Amino acid sequence: MPSHANRSSSVAGRISLCAMLAVVSLLFSYVEVILPFQSPVPGIKLGLANLVVLIALFRLDEKEAFVISLLRVLLAGILLAGAYSMLYSLAGSVLSFAGMLLLKKTGRFSIIGVSMAGGVLHNLGQILVAAVMISGTAIFYYLPVLTLSGMTCGIIVGIGAHILIRRIPEKLFPVS
Amino acid sequence: MNNSSIFRSIKKADLLLAAALLLLSFSGFVFLRPAASSDCVVVIRISGRIIAEYPLDADLTVRIPDDETGAGTAESGTAAADMPFNEIEILGREVCMRDANCSNRLCILQGKISRPGQSIICLPHRLTVEIRAEGTGKEVPDAVTR
């Protein structure tokens, strides 16, 4: 029977870990949906699901983090929101992940900064898709508001990730 | 929970990025708004009836001789100098009342308007000049389903 230290580094172990994290991320999305929150502007979210992706990005392989993000978008699209929402969410998530990965690789940003950028890019990705769908420049009026809210929520989520990431037992994540 | 560890882990690059993003978003407030005027229409009404419409992009001056009928036709027997008129100028995506011979000339004092929803009103002549945004039907969703 494999010991604790080896369990996560086997392929099956990693697959299980990613699947588990994807579901946790999905649950965070669900929590967001049921939180009572009246937003004047469509598209303002806390982005709690990104907390899991962040931790995965900093503690796991980046490919695994991406897969977790994709899975979350897919599952949340099927279970929680509609097909159109999933499109927006996908665009936002991909752009956000690309940016977060880039920033993380420079090594000059803390997890909070990375999360802040991720939040902004997520909103930006959604606006871009909206601009294509609605084919009008008026949608860009939302840009300042969504940038600010993306930053704020990103910072909040980033602080949460910062606090959590040290408290997760080492043996849960493979040595990276 | 150690609060200082949060502040200690914030790096210079984070703050620079935050500042840059803040700057970008605030400059967005400044630059994006005027862009709407490319689709706008200047609507001139007398007693509520639309008598003329011009694109906000146009550069022109309109002289509206207005009487009660609102058709702008001169009545015979009335000297041209006595005809009530308003001169509306559209220039550089701004609209203002250049001249008018109404009793209080308040319309001229109302200054320039440039954005949809704004208006200049000449009460004695029952004339209004307003900017209406075109294509509002497809701009922004009124509601979004979750």
Image (cartoon, coloured by chain):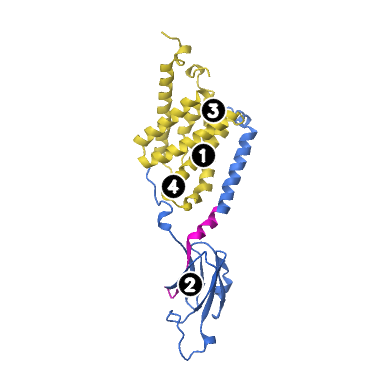
Chain colours: A yellow, B blue
Q: How many marks?
A: 4
Nearer-the-camera pick, B58 or B82: B58
Disc on res. B115: none
Q: Residues within 10 Å of mark 4 (few under 14, many from 20)?
A: few
Q: Write down the residue under mark 4.
A: A132
State yes or no: discs 4 and 3 in contact (Cβ < 8 Å).
no
Disc 3 to disc 2: CB gap under 8 Å: no
Give the answer, above or below, for where B62 lies relative to A131: below
Identify residue for label 2.
B128
Residue A71, x across and y down, in percent = 40, 30
> Are the residues under badges 1 and 4 in a single subunit?
yes
Q: Secondary structure at mark 3?
A: helix
Span shown in magenta: B32-49
Q: CA distance from mark 3 to mark 2?
A: 60 Å
At x 34% / y 35%, what residue is drawn?
A78
Q: Which residue is mark 1?
A: A121
Q: Is label 2 or label 1 in front? A: 1
